[in-house]
Image (cartoon, coloured by chain):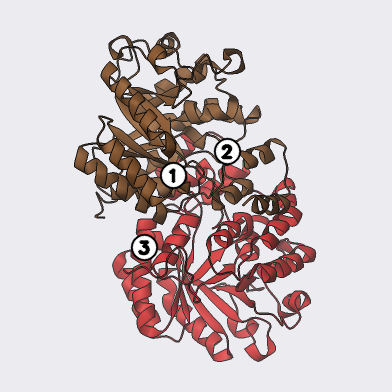
Chain colours: A brown, B red
Amino acid sequence: MKQKGNLVSFRPDVKVVDVTIRDGGLVNDFRFSDEFIKALYESNIKAGVDYMEFGYKASTELFNEDEYGKWKFCKEDDIRKIVGDNDTGMKIAVMADVGRTDYKKDIIDKADSAIDIIRVATYLNTIPAAVEMAEYCKAKGYETSINIMAISNAKESDIDDALDVISRSSVDMIYVVDSYGALVPEQIRGIAEKYIEMADATSKTVGIHAHNNMQLAFANTIEALRIGVSMLDASIYGMGRGAGNCCMELLLRFLKNPKYNVLPTLDFIEKYILSLIENGDVWGYDIQYLLTGSLNQHPRTAISFTKDKRKDYKKFFLDLLDKD
Amino acid sequence: MKQKGNLVSFRPDVKVVDVTIRDGGLVNDFRFSDEFIKALYESNIKAGVDYMEFGYKASTELFNEDEYGKWKFCKEDDIRKIVGDNDTGMKIAVMADVGRTDYKKDIIDKADSAIDIIRVATYLNTIPAAVEMAEYCKAKGYETSINIMAISNAKESDIDDALDVISRSSVDMIYVVDSYGALVPEQIRGIAEKYIEMADATSKTVGIHAHNNMQLAFANTIEALRIGVSMLDASIYGMGRGAGNCCMELLLRFLKNPKYNVLPTLDFIEKYILSLIENGDVWGYDIQYLLTGSLNQHPRTAISFTKDKRKDYKKFFLDLLDKD
């Protein structure tokens, strides 16, 4: 596939999506202070971030609101408290999981909402439900995205079938999601090329959401960018489940569009992220995540290993091999 | 440039070089216990590592032996104490810096040495001296490599001139060295292609030594591998100056040759590396290294920032910009 842009130019189609609250919320059960969220919102605007994801639109029937911070549910009033009418150039995103969102109840008309885009998270086997949800949101007036998770475990033919279904929908964006942090740039390229081919033919755009299990989240993101992916997910200091995400600060330093500025992000890290770490929130690359990633396994065993403060990597690896 | 090999096959020309003592020695002034070095040697053999670098062959006239551990000097007797006659498939390497090595005094006949390869480290402006040193070592019976440091600051025409001089020498290997961790895979590819073209025409091989300032050491290493680079430097847990190197454990999990085995490396990390970290040795990716790397600057300011336990990233970045 032909390269789009080069290392000096920039492509105006490229958009940066901050997923700190949403993916980072998986680290601390979404228990961020309002001060943190407000400061992140202001920092992202100054940094030139294009979209900021506030969290999940999770079902209050399925999840107990006492067990999570409010950003698992992203109620309209809670977002409004931070952004008002969001009279800025930055768009507001939320994620809606297939099967875990009461979308017909909780997703109101766009005209009445501060939210701009609903990102539907799905596995390959629930694509029809994802398309149904995305069409519902589109009809309500939102931008929509379908984010196909755990793609590293998928058969090529299943990906082709999913792309075919999505191509016939009104969805605006489709995301390559390397949930397990199992893919290397060469593999990301192969998958993204399929997505781009479909998207180019149907006036959709393609995004990438990478995990850092093998220290490849940033590398995979810029490889996807190089061949034409436009929507780039990143989080401040890489905050996200397990090994975390592509670091916002790496991405902002790399992108050549002068609208992007890393200084507000550095300031935010000093003032808000370091204290999370001091208080015991743990994420980021470590051996256990490399091992699950390189075995193309869900990171849950590595997350337990981390929580238990284990360091017996060799035994852990042997146990993972037993499960294969 | 055509890809060599794919993600399932393996190329028998690929060799893994452990640089833990040499680059890691820059973290702790080469103060490793003999027990550590012996265990690393045995672990590397079990892991299938092809070359193990023991340190520098530094001049005892220029450097005070009291101020460093013995692996800055790599005396024959010290290596022999660990490896005996090294009756194994793993080769022993040392690094010799141009201008900092009394090579005519300290490099003895290969027939009397446990060392197999001398890696000459040079900047572009000392290539003639590097070639002279490499020719001397070659005549003594060693394999030789010329490792051109700080290549991210070089003009293309200067690289071309250096490759021309080296092409007419007897040196066996030439290395792409991203000393500042400033290069992204696309740039590594551009430089490595030049090296490979010269090397293919003169029966030499090409190596890569990456730094992790932008979380790209592993990505840059496998990108170089993909297009035909054969010699891959890595260190255990990435131990090396500043942001450190490509992690051995990532590389061993990635390579498809069944001779490589990550288990001994995991065992070594548990038993020997974690205690270094607990005792205060610091290396690895952090914001300050991203900032120097992305500005294509030497990491010395970031290393000072780390030693001073500073966290004021924003001020640090503004100071770096002032120096540009």
Mark nearest the camera among 3 and 2 is: 2
What is the number of the mark on residue A151?
A: 1
- The numbered mark 1 sits on a residue in which chain? A
Please name the amino acid that badge 2 sits on.
Gly
Mark nearest the camera among 3 and 1 is: 1
Residue B200, above or below B6: below
Residue B162, above or below B252: below
* Residue for point 55% across, 53% down: A294
* Residue for point 45% across, 68% down: B123
Of the pair B323 and A122, the residue shown nearer to us: A122
Q: Quadrant of the N terminus of chain B?
A: bottom left
Residue A136, above or below A155: above
What is the number of the mark on residue A242?
A: 2
Q: Quadrant of residue A187?
A: bottom left
Residue A11, percent from left and from top: 24, 42
Please name the amino acid that badge 3 sits on.
Arg
Of the pair A218 and A35, the residue shown nearer to us: A218
What distance separates the C-alpha of mark 1 from that of mark 2?
17 Å
Please name the amino acid that badge 1 sits on.
Ile
Left or right: B125 in relation to A90 = right
The residue carrying pointer 1 sits among few (fewer than 14), some (14 to 19) or many (20 or more) residues within 10 Å by Cα, namely many
* Residue for point 31% across, 39% down: A206
What is the number of the mark on residue B189?
A: 3
Q: Are marks 3 and 1 on the same chain?
A: no
* Residue for point 59% across, 75% down: B101
Residue B91, percent from left and from top: 63, 78
Residue B173, percent from left and from top: 47, 78
Left or right: B223 in relation to B65 = left
